[in-house]
Image (spheres, rainbow, N blue to C red):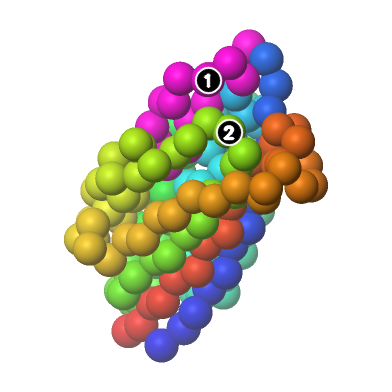
Amino acid sequence: MRIGHGYDVHKLVNNRKLIIGGVEIPFEKGLLGHSDADVLLHAICDSLLGAAAIGNIGKLFPDTDEKYKDIDSLVLLTEVGGLIKKQGYKIQNIDATVIAQNPKLSPYINSMRENVSSALGISADDVSIKATTEEGLGFSGRGEGIAAHAVCLIDR
């Protein structure tokens, strides 16, 4: 068995869609990034890549490559899932936490779980996604950005 951890953070800005877990969430700001800036999916990708010791999303999908400009991060997650499978690993479970003061994410969690499970070809029962605030503290508490942590377990 191998365990991986992923972390990602993106700044909240005007004139961008807010996409988390492959779900477009109504909000006055969105996350800044070269891709769709889906902080949750990026953290999950990095946890999986880390568990398999095959790099990170910055290495595999660099922001200097125009083919990844505004790409849907579900596409990236699907590619990562394929790489994990190609290395002979099976994803056992994923546990992730999104850290955002606003908006409230609980209405979207089940859709996020379904998106992740579908992209990776695993059961939604093997995907846990949670959301929390930082009680007004730090950059996320001030509404400057959103962060996500993810851990996963893979085996052969």
| Quarter occupied by residue 28 | top right
Q: Is residue 25 above or below residue 15?
A: below
Identified by mark 1, the residue type is: Phe
SS state under label 2: loop
Q: Earlier in the sequence, mark 1 or mark 2?
A: 1
Residue at 78% x, 42% y: name it.
139
Query: What segment is highlighted magenta in the picture?
Result: 15-29
Please rate how many residues cluster around mark 1, counting C-alpha atoms within 10 Å: few if below 14, some from 14 to 19, many from 20. some
Q: Is residue 140 above or below residue 14?
A: below
Label count reads 2
Left or right: 124 as drawn, with respect to 96? left
Q: Is residue 27 magenta?
A: yes
- Mark 2 and mark 1 in contact (Cβ < 8 Å)? yes
**Residue identified by numbered label 1:** 27
SS state under label 1: loop
Where is the C terminus found, in terms of image quarters?
bottom left
**Residue identified by numbered label 2:** 102
Residue 93 position within the rendered picture, expressed as x and y whole percent measured from the top left: 34, 70
Residue 87 position within the rendered picture, expressed as x and y whole percent measured from the top left: 39, 73
Q: Is residue 1 magenta?
A: no
Please rate how many residues cluster around mark 2, counting C-alpha atoms within 10 Å: few if below 14, some from 14 to 19, many from 20. some
Residue at 36% x, 82% y: name it.
155
Residue at 54% x, 51% y: name it.
132
| Outermost residue to the front | 135
* Viewer-proximal residue among 47 and 71: 47
Specify whether residue 34 is in view.
Answer: no
Q: Is residue 43 above or below residue 92?
A: above
Residue 37 numbered mark, or none = none
The prevailing secondary structure element of the residues shown in magenta is loop
Residue 37 position within the rendered picture, expressed as x and y whole percent measured from the top left: 58, 34
Residue 112 position within the rendered picture, expressed as x and y whole percent measured from the top left: 35, 43
